[in-house]
Image: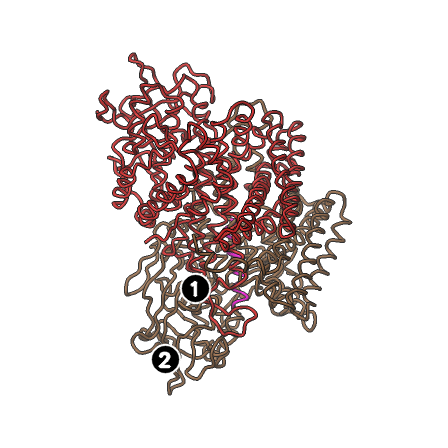
Chain colours: A red, B brown
Amino acid sequence: MSDYKAPIKDSLFALRMFGHLNDLAASEKYAQADPETVSTVLGEFGRFFEEVFGPVNAIGDTEGLKWSPEGVTTPAEFKPAYEKYVEAGWQGFGADTAYGGAGWPQGVYCLASEFMSGSNAALSMLPGLTVGAMELLEHWGSEEQKEKYLPRMVTGEWSGTMNLTEPQAGSDVGLSTTKADPQEDGSYLISGTKIFISFGDHDLTENIIHLVLARTPDAPPGTRGISLFLVPKFMVHDDGSLGERNDVDCVSIEHKMGIHASPTCVLSFGAQGGAVGYLVGEPNQGMRAMFTMMNNARLSVGTQGLSIAQASYQKAAIYSRERLQGRAIGSDSPGPVPIVQHPDVRRMLLTMRSQLEAMRNLVAHTAAALDMSQVTTGEESEGWTESLELLTPVVKSFCTELAVEITSLAVQVFGGMGYIEESGVSQLYRDARIAPIYEGTNGIQAMDLVGRKLGIRMGGAIADQFGRMHATLDEFRDAGSEFEASAQAFSSALDQLESTTAWIMEHGMADPRDALAGASPYLMIFGYTTGAWLMARQAMTARSDLEAGSDDAEYLEAKITSARFFCEQISPKVAGLVPAVTAGHEILYDIPEEQLTTF
Amino acid sequence: MSDYKAPIKDSLFALRMFGHLNDLAASEKYAQADPETVSTVLGEFGRFFEEVFGPVNAIGDTEGLKWSPEGVTTPAEFKPAYEKYVEAGWQGFGADTAYGGAGWPQGVYCLASEFMSGSNAALSMLPGLTVGAMELLEHWGSEEQKEKYLPRMVTGEWSGTMNLTEPQAGSDVGLSTTKADPQEDGSYLISGTKIFISFGDHDLTENIIHLVLARTPDAPPGTRGISLFLVPKFMVHDDGSLGERNDVDCVSIEHKMGIHASPTCVLSFGAQGGAVGYLVGEPNQGMRAMFTMMNNARLSVGTQGLSIAQASYQKAAIYSRERLQGRAIGSDSPGPVPIVQHPDVRRMLLTMRSQLEAMRNLVAHTAAALDMSQVTTGEESEGWTESLELLTPVVKSFCTELAVEITSLAVQVFGGMGYIEESGVSQLYRDARIAPIYEGTNGIQAMDLVGRKLGIRMGGAIADQFGRMHATLDEFRDAGSEFEASAQAFSSALDQLESTTAWIMEHGMADPRDALAGASPYLMIFGYTTGAWLMARQAMTARSDLEAGSDDAEYLEAKITSARFFCEQISPKVAGLVPAVTAGHEILYDIPEEQLTTF
């Protein structure tokens, strides 16, 4: 039995601070998104996943998947859970209302998706990937394609996949070789092998809509010659009924460290001569289309990190109050006492909790930037888009790096029991480890931040971001002596973020290797400092709620403590990372390659 | 097929710097331990494990163990591997020569045991636990017990176990309730349940000698009432032949995250009325006896962390030279190039490599302190013992924390492939995660460092340690401009270690909770600074070898680069941890327990 609880209250708190719900509700597009309605729907959403997806999470890990030439079979308990999900209509949560979606804002969707993924990360990948596929079709599909495929995807009856990776083409998608031969009827025959295709085959939906990157015969080399194709598992007749099986097969599934119930497929296209595919968008514009989807997918993976880490915190916190060991320090009582009373256990819990809150704030703020960019115009809209672009790699990497740390702390709180699979925290530790890898490794994200995002508007976007942080810092400094140490720590982190940013922009001009050599630690500096910024706002919001006479004092005081702990004890990690950012690339290349592999 | 290579050259380099082999060889006890002979034996030892234990490591992970009421069955490939180990006589490597051991010094044994564990961490736990049991018997057993049990353990024909943990008694051993009822013949009948007993049952040896903590009927409560008993799986006749089965059963084994081939047993003693046990040492002195063994066991677990992390580095380094993705930054060549050419991959490799070298130096220095304490007398010997005591918790925790980080980096270098079990790095990541937990969690180690070790000789031991570090720093500063940045970084780390130490000693007097609240980050500060100290010595040794005209220039230059990288880019992490040490305990207790588990 799962004991996962959707952190509904924390999500609403984050949305209230960063979700701009009143602004969104005043817009035509998101008129329904007033705080009260959002509160109701988040509550329902959270309870659904607690009750339906949560209880089959451990089963999925233990039983895993079965592969046969006919396809992939998921654990028996998954089918009824997914059916309930379809019945409840949750698949259309964030989808366009024109095709049957509920059209909730991205901020609301992201925080809701935390509940889904937190209850069952493996199973939740199926709906999550369908969302990505729907987004692609919404943006780039023809009207005919949208009408034919989207309505059944919005219900969840059909699922979607993303087919980018090939054995020789991972981070470097431009190396892909899958072919698309044009046919006289305007369709294409797709042939090639794609790997690492999550839910590339399964038995939970009637049909699977594969979105596949491939090359037409005359395409230029590299990423500029890649087109996007829609390849259904079963052909779809014009009346919407399913026809014969297309020429795409799952030839094997991977044996993975975690997310055991999420099939990672090798898909073979065209073993019988070619899988029928339909061009989505313009020829050779496949990468552009994929990038549309990738930003949201990266927010989703960051949120997945948050979600798994939150689930592990819950288990650790509960266990720490149940497990009796040792006596209380400085007490005469013989004990044993619950281990939550020991300072080091308390430190682990607060380290987890405060970082989780910072991560959730970061997700809410970044996803809301997308929403705000859509309901505003001109420079204001561009400013929100810049925020989104700048922070997306930080959400993806920072949240997934911390997810690995936090799930590891959960294992540690459990001690020996944490290493035993029955505890459930081992699964979460294993499940979390994929998040720094897929949807662009964290190293790729760091290169994106340094190589693309810092340069937005000649550095104007990052300068504006620093301006917003300084405004909060000024306010925080004036907010009273209770926040003095926190404001000092935030200020110090911000100084170091600014100085490392300046170093990178200056040295990166002369030699891009110098900028990239420190990109990963720089991204973490960015994350910790941004976390401190958002936690400063959390502390001030909670304090003003208290001063306004809230009847939820204990919760709000805890919010302040978390924020202070993050600023005062977590964000100083920035100082430990600065030398790695400003050291340059030369020392990294001092040791010849041969020597690196001489043991 | 395993590609593990024993890092023989690096081990010899560490031993040359820190092993005091010439001093040891000048002693009667370790006359054989001259550098040349050590070099030969380490080479043989390393090659044996590369060839015999390494190739069955992945099999052990995949196949795991089978349990039946008759006991635990290991993978079929383990038996011939272990038989070769017994034939080769390696079990007695560090054991007392009086009972057939080879009597190599602890420093040599520890660095050799890295090869064993690095080749196959799960299987290596069997010999490792036997070593611990032999040490206990050597120190505390009666002459009769030693003669009866030790010779067959030294050959590896019989194995040994440590039985401390019970369901309600983990870190808090004093809560254990296993009973020992005295019999008229001087033996005891043991009854109770022990959990987490590694290799508590298996099919690789003829007999298993369990060392068990239990209470006699009149024993005082807590740790002062615990005695140590020897409980053989099969009774041993006076002529050494095996008799009937004793009343101890493996009633189940755990399903674990990693070290799948190491059986973690629930042992039931006395289900048929009582297992025959023999008191080892004096009544109620069981904890004292266990502590003898625990120091070495903690060095072993630290070494295990090093070993698994080293294996993961090897895989990652090789893969990074094979895997082609992307183009070289700043180059016009279209690529793809081996990913080792990318700065971020290079950073990951150097982060792994430099930390591994620091860890190995730390293990060598600490283990050699034990050896030196045995071949010196008076104050000199006491000084070495103090070093050993002070650094043992640092070896255990620092090396195992870094092992989790390093194996995670190896997964990251592999990208998506790292999450697939076939890569082998996933196993290493899972195997490594136990090391921060067992043999005293890292939190317990930190409490030991702060609560017991800083106070040795009223702070005299730590003051002497700082003195040694300052002496190296002075030398390093004078060693030329090449080391200027490294010396500056080491100096800064040392300053911060000294100031946090002073803070803890001062505040811990007034309220021990303040000392313990920051114990874990303090231990990491201690580790990074000690690492910088030993890496400074490495850099200077390598430089002077080069100046003396060594013909191994590329290797020595790489040693200098690793040392500089550790000092300049890793040891600065100290700065990020200081605020957590000096914050005190109060904020950790601000949030009420109920609020911690309200989601």
Q: Is there one chain holding both mark 2 and mark 1? A: no
Residue type indicated by callout 1 = Arg
Name the residue rendered at 34%, 50% in the picture. Answer: A58
Question: Which chain is disc 2 placed on?
Answer: B
| Image depth: mark 2 or mark 1 in front | 1
Q: Position of residue B448 (x, y in %)?
A: 57, 65
The circle on residue B189 is 2
Q: Main secondary structure of the magenta part?
A: helix
Q: Which sits in the foreground, A541 or B461? A: A541
The circle on residue A323 is 1
The span from disc 2 to disc 1 (Cα, nearest Å) is 30 Å
Name the residue rendered at 48%, 29% in the picture. Answer: A172
Dot 2: element: strand
| Residue neighbourhood size for the residue with mark 1, other residues' Cα within 10 Å, grouped as few (<14), some (14–19), many (≥20) | some
Q: Position of residue B262 (x, y in %)?
A: 40, 58
Q: Which sits in the foreground, B65 or A66? A: A66
Judge left or right: residue A252 versus residue B444: left
Q: Which sits in the foreground, A29 or B296? A: A29
Residue type indicated by callout 2 = Leu
Q: Position of residue A53 (x, y in %)?
A: 32, 45
Vertical arrangement, residue B177 with respect to residue A11, above or below? below
Q: Which residues are magenta?
A: B294-310
Residue B302 in the magenta stretch? The answer is yes
Judge left or right: residue B236 versus residue B41: left
Residue A534 in the magenta stretch? The answer is no
| Residue neighbourhood size for the residue with mark 2, other residues' Cα within 10 Å, grouped as few (<14), some (14–19), many (≥20) | many
Residue A448 appears in the figure: no
- Count of all numbered marks drawn on residues in the image: 2
